Image (cartoon, helix red, strand yellow):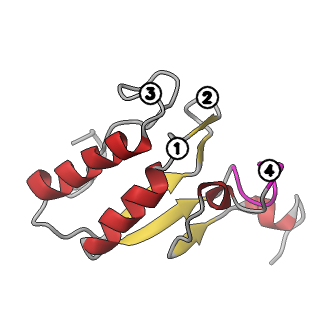
């Protein structure tokens, strides 16, 4: 576990198509998630969180097909799929309103932040 994170938090390989272990092979990265669920958990998970475009990791898109394969795996293990759209949401990708739309998936939950008000307070 990473220091400062609670029990049950697991990390998988970064599906970086440029510098990652499997290049742009999203299915290979998704198999890492399957392996972790099979060997590092009881076979069930609560949720999977992912940015659709890694903002902190250098504004890098995920490997092709990664989210489709992972979402199917996580849902089969009873988990929710959560899209972190704090940096990529609200039309910032240029082609879609949400970053996850570029991957052809629909999450169960979408997280967002102050971009929803376009700089203006909503409360």
**Left-right relation of 36 to 94:** left
Q: Nearer the viewer, mark 1 or mark 4?
A: 1
**Where residue 64 is drawn, which disc sits there?**
1
13 falls in the magenta region: no
**Where residue 58 is drawn, which disc sits there?**
2
Q: Nearer the viewer, mark 2 or mark 1?
A: 1
Q: With respect to residue 8, does 59 lie above or below?
A: above
Mark found first going from the N terminus, 3 or 1? 3
**Left-right relation of 123 to 50:** right
Distance of label 2 from label 3 (alpha carbons): 16 Å
Residue at 27%, 76% in the rendered image: 78
Q: Nearer the viewer, residue 34 or 87?
A: 34
**Where residue 92 is drawn, which disc sits there?**
4
Mark found first going from the N terminus, 2 or 3? 3
Q: Are marks 4 and 3 in contact (CB under 8 Å)?
A: no
Residue to which mark 3 is pinned: 23
Distance of label 4 from label 2 (alpha carbons): 15 Å
Distance of label 4 from label 3 (alpha carbons): 25 Å
Quadrant into which the C terminus falls: bottom right
Q: Are marks 1 and 4 in contact (CB under 8 Å)?
A: no
């Amino acid at each position: 576990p990473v220091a400062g994170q609670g029990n049950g938090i697991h990390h998988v390989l970064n599906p970086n198509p440029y510098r990652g272990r499997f290049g742009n092979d999203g299915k290979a990265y998704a198999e890492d998630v399957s392996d972790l669920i099979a060997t590092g958990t009881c076979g069930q998970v609560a949720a999977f969180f992912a940015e659709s475009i890694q903002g902190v990791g250098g504004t890098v898109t995920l490997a092709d097909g990664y989210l489709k394969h992972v979402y199917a795996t996580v849902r089969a293990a009873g988990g929710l799929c959560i899209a972190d759209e704090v940096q990529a949401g609200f039309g910032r990708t240029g082609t879609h309103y949400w970053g996850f739309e570029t991957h052809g998936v629909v999450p169960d939950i979408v997280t967002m932040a102050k971009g929803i008000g376009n700089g203006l307070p909503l409360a």
